[in-house]
Image (cartoon, rainbow, N blue to C red):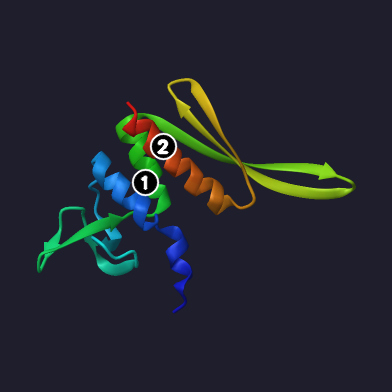
Amino acid sequence: MTENYKKDFVPHEPSLALKELGFDEPCFGYYKENIKELYKEFYCYNSDYVDYNELYIAAPIFSQAFRWFREKHQLDTSINTVYFKYNDTLSREYNGVINDKSVFTNIGFYDTYEEAELACLKNLIEIVKNK
């Protein structure tokens, strides 16, 4: 099996930040407290699972984290594909936008969808931390 599945899971640092914000949903991926390697299982872990004195940090997939922000904090996110033509070359970028109760925050343009997705998630974390 390839390691391609890892791109679906929120990385270690944002997962830890989500835990600190109160995210405690069951997840199929997890990190050990001080180890940044992603582990995946066929059963779920939540953030408070402890085994042999090791704390596990739940690693949600991106859609699960975005759903949590929508349901718990009423923060919506969209990632839009923007096409533009420059010198007869058609290019594409990805733009992330966060909607916080009719206030739209444009978080910038990125070369890949995954970069825009991670930037949106990090911005959502900062918005909730600063509330």
Q: On screen, 72 above or below 116?
A: above
Residue 91, how many percent across, how many down? Answer: 76, 49
Q: Residue furthest bottom?
A: 1
Residue 25, how many percent across, how many down? Answer: 25, 49
Q: Quick one: quadrant of the C terminus?
A: top left
In the picture provided, is 9 more to the left or to the right than 50? Answer: right
Q: Quick one: quadrant of the N terminus?
A: bottom left
Tell us which disc is closer to us: 1 or 2.
2
Callout 1 touching callout 2 (CB < 8 Å): yes
Residue at disc 2, secondary structure: helix
- The amino acid type found where label 2 is placed reads Leu
Q: Which residue lies furthest to the left in this view?
A: 52
Residue 49, picture quadrant: bottom left
Number of dots carrying numbers: 2
Residue 82, how many percent across, how many down? Answer: 69, 41
Residue at the disc numbered 2:
124
Q: Which residue lies furthest to the right in this view?
A: 88
Residue at disc 1, secondary structure: helix
In the picture provided, is 33 more to the left or to the right than 50? Answer: right
Q: Which residue is drawn at 23% across and 60% down?
A: 33
Q: Which mark is drawn over residue 44?
A: none
Q: Which residue is drawn at 39% across and 35% down?
A: 126
Residue at the disc numbered 1:
65
Q: Residue at x 26, y 47 (%)?
A: 19
Residue 41, picture quadrant: bottom left
- The amino acid type found where label 1 is placed reads Ala
Question: Distance from label 1 to label 2 (Cα)?
Answer: 10 Å
Q: Count neighbours of disc 2 (C-alpha within 10 A) and say few if under 14, some if 14 to 19, many if 20 or more.
A: many
Q: Count neighbours of disc 1 (C-alpha within 10 A) and say few if under 14, some if 14 to 19, many if 20 or more.
A: many
